[in-house]
Amino acid sequence: MSKRKLARFGLYGFCGALLALTLAPSCKEDDTEEKQRESIERYITNTLRAEVDERDGVYYVPVKPEKPDTISGRRTVEAGDSVTLEYEAMTLSGVLFATSDTITAREKGLEPLPATDLEVGSGKLIAGLDRGLLRMAHGEQAILLFPFTLGYGKEYVGLVPSTSALVFNVLVKEVNKQ
């Protein structure tokens, strides 16, 4: 799929999710992890109309059905692999704070952050993203949602307020086995 088509597909899907998130109960700074998990689960079941799939603290909602590589089969992401991603990241309250798409980044006044050669399972990524990627494979797209304890914690980072639950719309473009 071309980057333009993906951007259009991802943008429409993400805009729908963004609208739904703005209508979903937000996670305030004084929310506990338990309250954030309840808000995330309500959002998944009521807005995305998906089943709650939580493992290792990360909620996983597939967006694009997996397409196994025709030559080598399903190339799953494992600890130590490096991946190339296309992604959009926002708080559960709807604030977009990072994207790999340069057009969207410019429109929102953000610095585009390309996601290439990211090492998974090494502790270099925030915990929720790291754990969520370990459930994915080459060509898969999913929404990963997780509470502040697996995100930036009680830190205020850029546009992300402290104790914010995070939402990542991620497409795994490449998996490089180590």
Image (spheres, grey):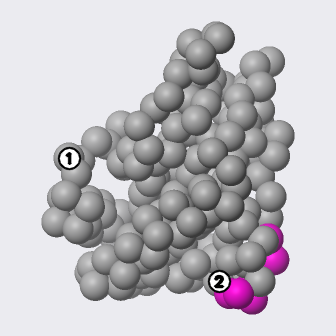
Give the amino acid type for the residue marked by disc 2 in the picture.
Leu
Give the amino acid type for the residue marked by disc 1 in the picture.
Glu
Q: Quadrant of residue 98?
A: bottom right
- Spot occupied by residue 71 in the image (x, y as percentages of width and height): 65, 11
* Label 1 to label 2: alpha-carbon separation: 30 Å
Name the residue carrying label 2.
Answer: 159
| Main SS of residues in magenta | loop
- Spot occupied by residue 177 in the image (x, y as percentages of width and height): 75, 19
**Residue 124 visible at all:** yes
Q: Earlier in the sequence, mark 1 or mark 2?
A: 1
Name the residue carrying label 1.
Answer: 51
Is residue 41 located in the magenta-colored stretch of the structure? no
Judging depth in this view, the residue of 65 and 81 nearest the camera is: 65
Circle 1: element type: loop
Judging depth in this view, the residue of 64 and 149 nearest the camera is: 64
- Spot occupied by residue 37 in the image (x, y as percentages of width and height): 29, 60
Judging depth in this view, the residue of 117 and 68 nearest the camera is: 68
Residue occupying the point 70% across, 55% down: 3
Which quadrant, please, contains the C terminus? top right
- Spot occupied by residue 172 in the image (x, y as percentages of width and height): 62, 41
Magenta residues, start to end: 107-112
> Dot 2: few (<14), some (14–19), or many (≥20) neighbours within 10 Å?
few
